Amino acid sequence: MPEHVLHPGLQVIEALAKLGECLGYEVERERRVGGKSAAVDLAWYAAGDRWMPLMIFEVESKASSGMANNAMKVLSRDVDDFVKPLFLFHVVLKGSATNERISNLRRQWGSHNYRVYTLELDGENQRLVVDILSQHRRVTKSIDLEGVSATLDGVVWEAVDKISILSKLRDLEYSANYLGGLARIGLRNPSLVSLYMDSLESIHIAGRDAAGRYGGFIGDYIPGLLEISILISCGRLPDEGGPRKLEKWQERSGYGMRTIGPYFGLSRDYDSFVLGVAPYVYGMAGMLLREHPESYSWLAKDLHSIVMQEYRQQVREPAMLPGAVWLLHISASGPSLFPAQNGTDSEFEAFFESSRALINGGGGLPVEVLDSPPDYVDVHDERVMNEWLGCLEGERIDVPKLRDFNERYFPGGDCAEIGREYALKAAMEMLMADDWRCRSVDLFIRELRRSPR
């Protein structure tokens, strides 16, 4: 068969070649199958082995009289002359559902590992991709979710339902990094983020494990607070069920210990997380839960409990301050976010006053720290700790009372509208990053403080 010269045919061949490379095959265009002129448009080989192709693709511009020969040159050959591939995909760009030539080919070769796809018809692009992935499962159990998703972004695959395709990989029992992979896919393409939410539902609602890992410190260490907050924020878990789910997660470790709590001395990593990382995680969760009063109230109460226990254990001031400052902002936001709801105003005010008294009892804070609490403090890292101690030097001010404190943070001004989408993106990035430090905590704080209404 002569090589394709028309752009649509070349586009399809190149798209199939890229998909093959993504799946780990070596790809060859115009692969000879015997004789001087007989060749197939595209062949996929096992990596490092070009003896015989595993998959073969023939691409036709239309259902012509010669397309039967293109099937025969592969499927009718003697095995001593040409070993049959695992599958022959015969792709026709244009044709009707009742085309007699295509029907004849299906009747002739349908009992073989052969199928015809007419891409002009609805659903045929989808069927082609599903069949390719189904045949690929016969070759290997592992697959690169992110690579497949990125490859299907091409123009040839515009009609493909990517959510359905990526979900199909689970049905085919592919081994993949579903957790981190789907999270990264959702970050790059928000229209696909529902697949990541499905994974979180599987973990926290259905009680099943999700294969894979995030690859970041928070995500691989203690991700549950952010994951459950994401589900609540996106409506996958109703606000009224949020506190129960969050509390159950906190108590899952058993033995009277909570997942995040002031249990110092268990490990250096845990000490550093609770004192210098968890406060910022609570702040991020607060961003996610700003429109969910019951869950937000649980969050403020839980952080208040941790900070007060640290105080009672006489944790030294520099190590305790990250939690105390984040508690100030989370609790101070409560009355403006959820005014006069079942007495929560007084609860938030009590949390604020506890933190305010603790901070002022130690001499107050530099205004820069008050307005921009830390995103990371490692009490066991001398360089990071010295950086934090440097932030605490200089003139300090007392934390003002709640009304005056809230007047420092105003809606609008130099704070751009960010909203839930920003919080969701930032939380997902935090789960996957080893370095999640925020370039502008001041912007973050102003958005946390802004009423969503």
Image (cartoon, helix red, strand yellow):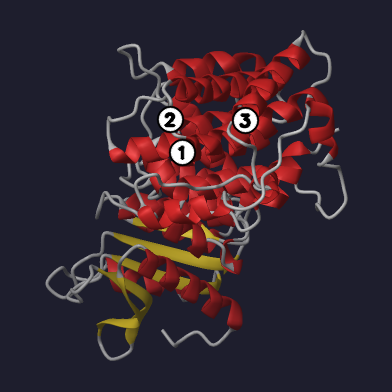
Q: Label 2: which residue?
A: 315
> Which label's residue is closer to the chain start, 3 or 2?
2
Q: Are the residues tagged 1 and 2 within 8 Å (C-beta)?
A: yes
Is residue 133 positioned above or below 398 on the image? below
Amino acid type, residue under disc 1 in the picture: Ala
- What is the quadrant of the C terminus in the image? top right
Q: Secondary structure at mark 1?
A: helix
Residue at x-position 26% and y-position 49%:
141
Estimate how packed mark 3 is, as few (under 14), some (14 to 19) or many (20 or more) residues with alpha carbons within 10 Å. Answer: many
Q: Is residue 198 left or right of residue 348?
A: left
Image coordinates for residue 32, horizontal then vertical, percent: 28, 83
The residue mark sitting in front, 3 or 2, is 2
Residues at marks 1 and 2, CA–CA distance in whole angstroms: 7 Å
Amino acid type, residue under disc 3 in the picture: Leu
Residue that protrudes farthest toward the bottom in the picture: 36
Residue at x-position 46% and y-position 15%:
248
Is residue 109 positioned above or below 380 on the image? below
Q: Is residue 196 visible?
A: yes
Image coordinates for residue 105, horizontal then vertical, percent: 43, 60
Which disc is residue 166 wearing? none
Viewer-proximal residue among 57 and 63: 57
Q: Secondary structure at mark 2?
A: loop
Q: Label 3: which residue?
A: 327
Which disc is residue 319 wearing? 1
